[in-house]
Image (tube, helix red, strand yellow):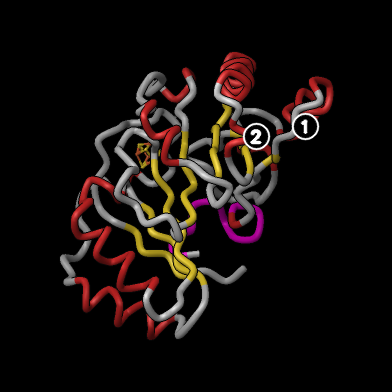
Amino acid sequence: MPCTFVRLTGCNLRCDWCDSEYTFTGGVRLSIDEVVERVQALSPAGLVEITGGEPLLQEQEVLALMDRLLAPGYRVLLETSGERPLQKVPSQVHKIVDVKCPGSGEGGSFYTENLRSLSKNDEMKFVIAGRQDYEFAKAFSREHHLVELTGGVIFSPAFRKDASGSRDTSHCLLDPQTLAEWILADGLNVRLGIQVHKFIWDPALKGV
Ligand code: SF4
């Protein structure tokens, strides 16, 4: 679905396969009014995703921005690493919450209290670079009943961060076909999440 992205600068994690390292620094300082104006210019109604970097590092401003976008009827998504507390995020916001697997280099960063902030309006996401990550994601999902607790659990194959050129699965650190076969063999009720924009446009292209 067409979606307007609000991408915030800064992240306190350093995932090995991070494809948005350009967000660690730089950016443009904008007031909440200016962000809302830009969103309205791009999309007078519809879907807005707040992402980063890690958007909740600017928690106070991001919470205010969420309220400003929810009020006129935007459907608001939040993409977050799972390391920051989620308690204050409005329940209408659809949270897509990562749990970092060992292969990311940031395993163990998930803030466990966040499990209490999840509902059927939210999704959990594991980016998976190999079998060890898969086993971790499977065990974590089962232990915390994520399929029952949330609106969906996503297993997504990690992409090489320097991917460019061809728009195919050769850039995946784990072949999606292999991941699909593992999911089917184990009978998991999870979704295989593919970064669709990396197959439609050049994987290195920003702003799509
Ligand atoms: S949490 Fe997200 S933005 Fe931060 S390093 Fe990991 S993948 Fe990159």
Q: Quadrant of the N terminus?
A: bottom right
The amino acid type of the residue labelled 2 equals Val
In the rendered picture of this protein, how many numbered marks are placed on residues?
2
The kind of residue on which mark 1 rests is Ala
Q: Which mark is on residue 180? A: 1
Q: Residue at x 28, y 47 (%)?
A: 56
Dividing the picture into quadrants, the one containing residue 155 is top right
Image point (26%, 58%), residue name: 62
Residue 200 in magenta stretch: yes
C-alpha span from label 2 to label 1: 17 Å
Foreground pick, 58 / 164: 58
Residue 178, percent across and down? 76, 27
Name the secondary structure under disc 2: helix
Residue 2: name its quadrant: bottom right
Which quarter of the figure has residue 108? top left
Q: Which residues are magenta?
A: 198-207
Q: What is the number of the mark on residue 147? A: 2
Query: On screen, 162 above or below 60?
Result: above
